[in-house]
């Protein structure tokens, strides 16, 4: 049963008492929150030995999106998904493209709309969406809201999507996999040094890799995203190691999105990623055995499309927010050669 207290939600699960404080078990930071204090994301507060979520139900934005925008290219292509964003994050990435909602301030809640999980599901159904996604900011900072909403969504035959930086605790993952269909996971870097620069302090990239493997093994559809920032995480040897890891641990059929960094006011000296750099990464991924590498933030690039890894037939065409299913058969195979194209339809 879901209970509401002045729009602040009391967390009774994924929390334990430890040394007189409360340990939150949703994020890999495992914040130990003392009486009267908040966790790193500033969304969870210890009030007299009880943990409250200040972000539960507070929606900063919602929209009807193509599923490809998440990005998920091999999951219910051309379908519409009801997308929800909240406030805050468990990272402090200096190049964040959604920094306005990701960097929490108490006054931000005044600009949100309070929506119960059942309201989100009703809105998604009314809009004719096939599924529901938590996106725009990191869903882990209001994990309880996500779990409650996904449970209701699954009961109404809506698919569920989690767009994430992957820094969730195993305790949350155990619960999430029971109600989750697909995840778009951002592997920001493949070394502690690069990861720390990308996240503004967190160097534990192995924790993100563990999340990827746990979700993949549980049967959740996983697609990987890496936003390439010049002079930060664009070392080719590091990217080679990352691509090899994806191929060996998640499978050669795993969609891998490499996206162009768009300059942000917070990092005025970091330019946009050079167009030609993506051709190098794509060629490398193909040599390593990855079957589906896509380029993001460049809508005119041919690597927005999906081609059969066996015969080269174009299966799906994408431009901006438009998706056209061409050579993909209803059973997820190539119409030309019959090869499995590894789609969830």
Image: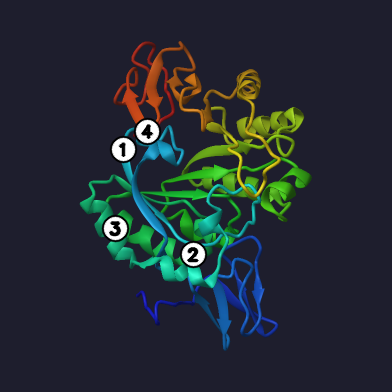
**Could you tell me which residue is drawn at 39 percent across and 11 percent down?**
337
How far from the left and from the top, in percent, is residue 40?
64, 67
Q: In the rendered structure, find residue 185 and report the number of the disc placed on it.
A: none
Based on the displayed image, in which of its 4 quarters is residue 276 positioned?
top right
Name the residue tied to disc 1.
Answer: 79
Check whether the beta carbons of the residues at disc 1 and disc 4 lie within 8 A of each other: no
Q: Nearer the viewer, mark 4 or mark 3?
A: 4
116 up-or-down from 82: above or below: below
Q: In the rendered structure, find residue 321 and report the number of the disc placed on it.
A: 4
Q: Quadrant of the C terminus?
A: top left
Check whether the beta carbons of the residues at disc 3 and disc 2 lie within 8 A of each other: no
Check whether the beta carbons of the residues at disc 1 and disc 2 lie within 8 A of each other: no
Q: Which residue appears farthest toward the bottom when viewing the image?
A: 48
Q: Earlier in the sequence, mark 1 or mark 4?
A: 1
Name the residue tied to disc 3.
Answer: 121
Q: Earlier in the sequence, mark 1 or mark 2?
A: 1
Q: CA distance from mark 4 to mark 2?
A: 28 Å
Q: CA distance from mark 1 to mark 2?
A: 26 Å
Q: CA distance from mark 4 to mark 3?
A: 23 Å
SS at badge 3: helix
**Could you tell me which residue is drawn at 55 percent across and 32 percent down?**
256
Based on the displayed image, in which of its 4 quarters is residue 236 positioned?
top right
Name the residue tied to disc 2.
Answer: 142
156 sits left or right of 267 in the view: left
Return the residue nearer the eye: 21 or 317.
317
């Amino acid at each position: 049963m879901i209970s509401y207290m002045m729009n602040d939600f009391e967390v009774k699960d994924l929390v334990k008492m430890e040394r007189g404080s409360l340990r939150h078990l949703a994020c890999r930071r495992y914040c130990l929150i003392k009486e009267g204090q908040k966790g790193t994301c500033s969304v969870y507060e210890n009030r007299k030995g009880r943990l409250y979520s200040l972000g539960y139900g507070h929606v900063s934005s919602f929209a009807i999106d193509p599923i490809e925008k998440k990005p998920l290219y091999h999951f219910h292509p051309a379908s519409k998904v009801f997308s929800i964003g909240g406030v805050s994050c468990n990272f402090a990435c200096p190049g964040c493209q959604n920094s306005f909602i990701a960097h929490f301030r108490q006054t931000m809640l005044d600009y949100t709309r309070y929506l119960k999980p059942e309201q989100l599901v009703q809105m998604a159904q009314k809009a004719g969406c096939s599924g529901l996604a938590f996106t725009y900011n990191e869903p882990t900072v209001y994990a309880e809201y996500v779990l409650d909403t996904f449970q209701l969504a699954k009961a109404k035959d809506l698919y569920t999507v989690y767009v994430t930086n992957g820094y969730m605790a195993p305790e949350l993952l155990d619960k999430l996999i029971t109600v989750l269909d697909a995840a778009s996971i951002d592997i920001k870097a493949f070394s502690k040094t690069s990861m720390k620069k990308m996240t503004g302090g967190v160097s534990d990239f192995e924790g993100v890799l563990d999340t990827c493997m746990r979700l993949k093994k549980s049967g959740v559809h996983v697609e990987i995203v890496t936003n390439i920032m010049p002079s930060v995480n664009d070392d080719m040897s590091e990217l080679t190691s990352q691509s090899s890891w994806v191929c060996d641990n998640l499978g050669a059929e795993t969609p891998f999105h490499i996206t162009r960094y768009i300059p942000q006011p917070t990092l005025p000296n970091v330019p946009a990623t050079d167009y030609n750099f993506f051709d190098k990464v794509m060629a490398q991924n193909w040599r390593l055995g990855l079957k589906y590498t896509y380029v993001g933030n460049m809508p005119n690039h041919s690597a927005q499309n999906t081609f059969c890894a066996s015969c080269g037939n174009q299966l799906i065409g994408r431009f901006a927010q438009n998706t056209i299913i061409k050579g993909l058969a209803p059973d997820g195979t190539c119409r030309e050669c019959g090869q499995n194209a590894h789609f969830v339809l």
